Image (spheres, grey):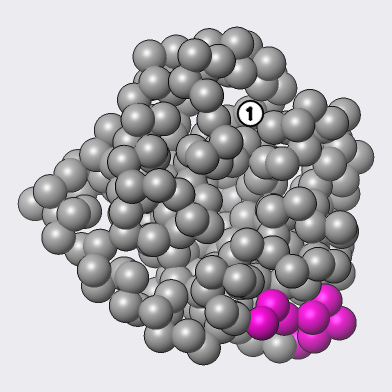
Amino acid sequence: MVQSQAYLQEIEEARRSSQKLLAVLIDPDKFEEHTAEAFLRKLPSDVTHLLVGGSSVANGRTCEVVKWLKHFTALPIILFPGDQNQISAHADAILFLSLISGRNPEYLIEQQVRSVEKIRQTQLEVIPTGYILIDGGHETSVQRVSNTIPLRQEQVQDIVNTALAGQYSGKKLIYLEAGSGAKFPVSEKIIAEVHTATTIPVIVGGGIRNTAQVQRAYAAGADMVVIGTAFENGSFR
């Protein structure tokens, strides 16, 4: 059965119409179910999507968190999985991530192959996504788990070429990631160059701590900005 691509189409239409999207990333291992309703009430009014996932999550946790969130929100819930064990049929869609900035086959294709049977048993919308890890000033959990080295922020052309390689190989989104709790976010120059070179939506996350940084990412060309750690710990302003 051909699965709907409604959520991808919404993101693509947002790029075409210059509508800016805002997502909050929820790490299942840091989320407490009994706080779900209160957590969602605190979301900024302009949040359009929820992403759920982490670099390393206990088996079954993602599914439990998604089910709780579904009780209290109609926002689209999109999986942002660190591995095959973070797949939940209760979500709306999944970013089918490939860590194209690294050269570890485990996260280029192995985890993806292992996830196929689980995904086929769901109605999840599958969104092929090129994931590019960029240095945010300190070692991140993604770097440790994936055993890959992030691209340096000054490697702008390498980052652009990697994004284009992702687009040319069929990815529908490009995700520029500085990593959870990054000291500094992806630079505006990188965002602008990737946005100009590609024709697919660009997502930017990692190290974004305030609305001014969100707006600068938008102005540079980000179609969706993701906030996570700063919102979790209450420091986002």
x%, y% of residue 195? Answer: 70, 66
Q: Most extreme residue toward the left, as rendered?
A: 1
Relative to the observer, which residue lies in front, 219 or 37? 37
Relative to the observer, which residue lies in front, 209 or 137? 137
Relative to the observer, which residue lies in front, 194 or 119? 119
User: Is residue 152 among what the camera can see?
Assistant: yes
x%, y% of residue 107? Answer: 43, 75
Residue sitting at 41 percent across and 85 percent down? 105
Q: Is residue 40 left or right of residue 213?
A: left
Q: Is residue 40 left or right of residue 63?
A: right
Whether residue 67 is situated above or below residue 93 in the rendered picture: above
User: Local crowd at mark 1 within 10 Å, few (<14), some, or many (≥20)?
Assistant: some
Image quarter of residue 111: bottom left
The quadrant of the image that shows the C terminus is top right
Q: Most extreme residue toward the right, as rendered?
A: 212
Q: Most extreme residue toward the front, as rendered?
A: 58
Whether residue 230 is situated above or below residue 81 in the rendered picture: above
Whether residue 188 is situated above or below residue 14 in the rendered picture: below
List the residue tagged with mark 1: 47
- Which span of residues is magenta-colored? 149-157
Where disc 1 sits, the SS reads loop
Image quarter of residue 132: bottom right
Residue sitting at 52 percent across and 24 percent down? 32
x%, y% of residue 213? Answer: 87, 45
Image quarter of residue 142: bottom right
Magenta span includes 85:
no
Q: Main secondary structure of the magenta part?
A: loop
Residue sitting at 61 percent across and 71 percent down? 144
Q: Total number of numbered labels? A: 1
